[in-house]
Each structure stands twice: as C-alpha cells, then as structure tokens.
Amino acid sequence: MKTKLLLFALIVLPLVGALAGEKPYNFRTHDAYQKLSDTDKQRLEQVHRDFVLLWGALDMYADYHNGNLPETLDELVPECLGELPSDPFVTEPKNLKESYYQPSKKGYGYQYRKGSPGNRAWIVASVGLPDFPYLAERGNIGLYLCKGTWLSGINPMPAK
C-alpha cells in the first residue's frame, strides 16, 4: 500500500498540473516556507506526507464501502491504516466542539470533515501554521487538504 501511495504522489499528482498546462504550485518555493524554522519545516513536511497517506486511505475506505466515507478518521484503523498519524503541530488536544471538523486520536491527530452523504469529498486539516499558503501562492491560507467540490464551506449533493 505504501508503494502505491508513493507512486501516486510522485507520478499522478505532478501530472495533473502538467496536463492542465500550468506548473503545479510548490509550497516549498514560497517565501513563507523559507522563513520557517528548521523544526517547522520538518513538521510541515511530515504533515504533507500524512496528507498524502490519509488521502489514499480515505479513497480506499470509500472503495470498500460503496463510496461512503467514514464519520471520523479513527474509522480508517485497522482496515486501511495500521495506525493514524499524529498532527506534529498539536501540543495539547484541540477542542473542536464548536467546529465542523471531527478530531482524531483523541485530539492529537488531524481534523476531518466529510462532505454530504453520497459525495466523495472531504477536508483534512492540521492545527499548525494557520497563515501558511499550503495550497496556492495566493488564497487557500491554512494547512489543509481538500477533495471534492466545496462551495462556501458546503459540499453540495450529487445530481441524481
């Protein structure tokens, strides 16, 4: 499984941007990355690897469950992952009671939000580096990975 995820990350993801006729955004080339401490750079690299791992695990879970996603990331274990990764920026459990996100690993893991029922869409987020341009040169500030269509924070139902 790790080999498939690594091949996906190394081959498929760069091809998507190339086929669209544009050079894919690389957060490592942004000035904000250069200004980070070595520790924060290492943590950011770990989050990036974990996002790729969780992306594959969520897709695998949906494949196994007729396109349905889990309610929490904790449900990925043990069927799709041996264990969940911890968010390297979490120093104490985050209280998400008034949030759309579900915590994982009793607050020490990544935050998760699934899309509407029947939609294969989700967001996985880290609590660290809230002002970091992880997904784009401008806009998309924060440390998260989003899959599917989200309009103003809402994931619409699929057309039937």
Image: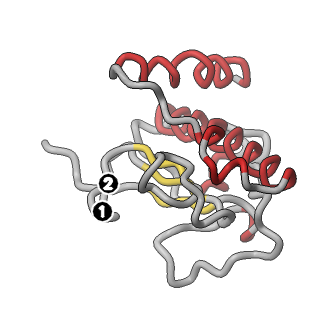
Counting other residues with Cα less than 10 Å from the Cα at mark 2, is it few (<14), some (14-19), or many (20 or more)? some
Secondary structure at badge 1 equals: loop
Farthest right residue in view: 39
Q: Does residue 7 appear to the left or right of 13 in the view shown?
A: right
In the rendered view of the protein, which quadrant contains the N terminus?
Answer: top right
Circle 1: residue type: Ile
Q: Are marks 1 and 2 in contact (CB under 8 Å)?
A: yes
Which residue corresponds to the image point at 63% horizontal and 49% vertical from the top-left? 31
- Name the disc covering residue 99, or none: none
Callout 2: SS? loop
Judging depth in this view, the residue of 61 and 91 nearest the camera is 91
* Residue in view at x 52 percent, y 22 percent: 14
Residue 154, numbered label: 1
Badge 2 amino acid: Trp
Q: What residue does disc 2 label?
A: 150
Looking at the picture, how far across and down is residue 111, in whole percent?
A: 60, 62
